[in-house]
Image (cartoon, helix red, strand yellow):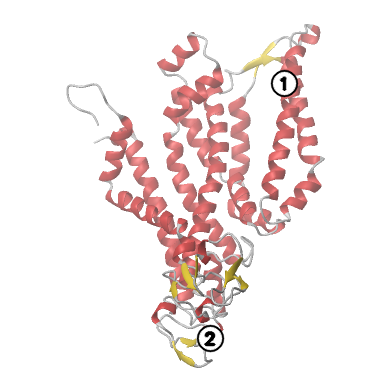
Amino acid sequence: MFKKGKENFNFREYAWQQFKKNKPAYYSFKVLVFLIVVAILAPIIANDQPLYIKYKGNSFFPAFSLSNKIEIKNPDTGQTEDLQLDITDWKYVDAETIVWAPIAYAPGKTDLANADYVGPNGNQQFIDKDGKTIDMPLKFRHWLGTNKRGEDVLSGLVHGTRISLTIGILSMSIASVLGIVLGSMAGYFGDKRMSTTRGSFWTFVLGLIFAFYYGFMTRSYAMADALGNSGMSILVQLMITLLIFSFVSFCFYRFGKMIGRIPFLSLNKKIFIPVDSIISRIIEILISLPNLILIISIAAIARPSIVNLMIIIGFTSWTGIARFTRAEFLRISNLEYIQAAKSIGVKEFQIIFKHAMPNGIAPALISIAFGIASAILTESSLSFLGIGVPPDTVTWGSLLSAGRENYNAWWLVIFPGLAIFVTVTVYNLIGEGLRDALDPRLKK
């Protein structure tokens, strides 16, 4: 905080105090914390396996078990039996003690007795151990109803929170790295600040062609296979491709350093690299393409996967962050402390990432907050269309899509739609709060 008579102004504390003054943003931050807690504790909040059970004198925790099989020893006979956790119907297990999750259903698990769209206030039924149909006990009730297959909507909403927040945060992490790095380079170097020799420049350009060929073209089949598979394979293959691309580029960069010393054909002549123009043209090309249509086109080719979806959204959403970062670095690059660092011989990239970036990243944080909301909305749109995550993965968008089959099942539209609306609104209000808190022109 800024105190009169002292020069110990702490901008972080000041920004936090300004953020707290914006009540909608501050309460939205609390809602976001609640959503994060729900996402982390989703397996404990909604699970069809008990949190704790005591069965035949044996105590264990099925919901927390890393194995699908538990060996139980009968204290009376001494015989052992295997209990398969994922296929056991725990409602009919004759246990001495059992502790259920607050929502005793897992996403995607069917309740045939309450299939075919049973509403929150509908007549929900339960089949007891004797096979008789009785009224649903309170602890097993579907509080937000079921869909056509009898899957619990509230359980799907709870676990969908984890998927939506994970995709939103991780995809924007990818976009943030790309946007901040490229934007900072464009704003700091401009078109007249990065110089090299003619030989070094054209050798490096030639190296980029070879790097693209060996990194991407020769591995196109491996990338295509990984893109067609679900899981982490695409991420591993992408890392291998980037490593090959970086290694070949670095080799040509070092070779270009030697070529640049040769006076033949003026290869040692100094030239300027138009970094800002190159990056700005790439940004303009991507901005000119409809983002949602571009994402849908790529997602339709790739097999539905959470990892694929995060990568697709991340690599198509970095332009806004790059533009904000570039604009801020254009201002910062001319300040006195940057010029002082140059005068004492500090390396350019050290100035960018150690000195300039901490002071120029604030506008990007605002764009990142809005970007997470946009990523969640994009994931919900793709899941609604059936080309986002795998069909067996329950998300807010897939729950909303199920509502198209029966318009009388209003709970399949209202509750997932409300969850999407609240989450997107929360991130937008947090973004506005960050903008007001980090903008010195709005200082009160």
**Circle 1 or circle 2, nearest the eye:** 2
Q: Residues within 10 Å of mark 2 (few under 14, many from 20)?
A: some
Between marks 1 and 2, how big is the CA–CA gap? 67 Å
Instruction: Specify the label residue 253 is tagged with.
Output: 1
Q: Is residue 97 left or right of residue 381?
A: left
Against 15, residue 256 (above or below) is above
Residue at horizontal 44%, vertical 73%?
98
Judged from the image, the secondary structure of the residue bearing numbered disc 2 is helix
Judged from the image, the secondary structure of the residue bearing numbered disc 1 is helix
Which of the pair 124/273 is nearer the observer?
124
Residue situated furthest front in the rendering: 77
Q: Quadrant of residue 266?
A: top right
**Circle 1: residue type:** Tyr
**Circle 2: residue type:** Ala
Which of the pair 419/377 is nearer the observer?
419
Q: Is residue 338 left or right of residue 227?
A: left
Which residue does the numbered mark 2 point to in the structure image?
Answer: 113
Going from N to C along the chain, the mark reached first, 1 or 2, is 2
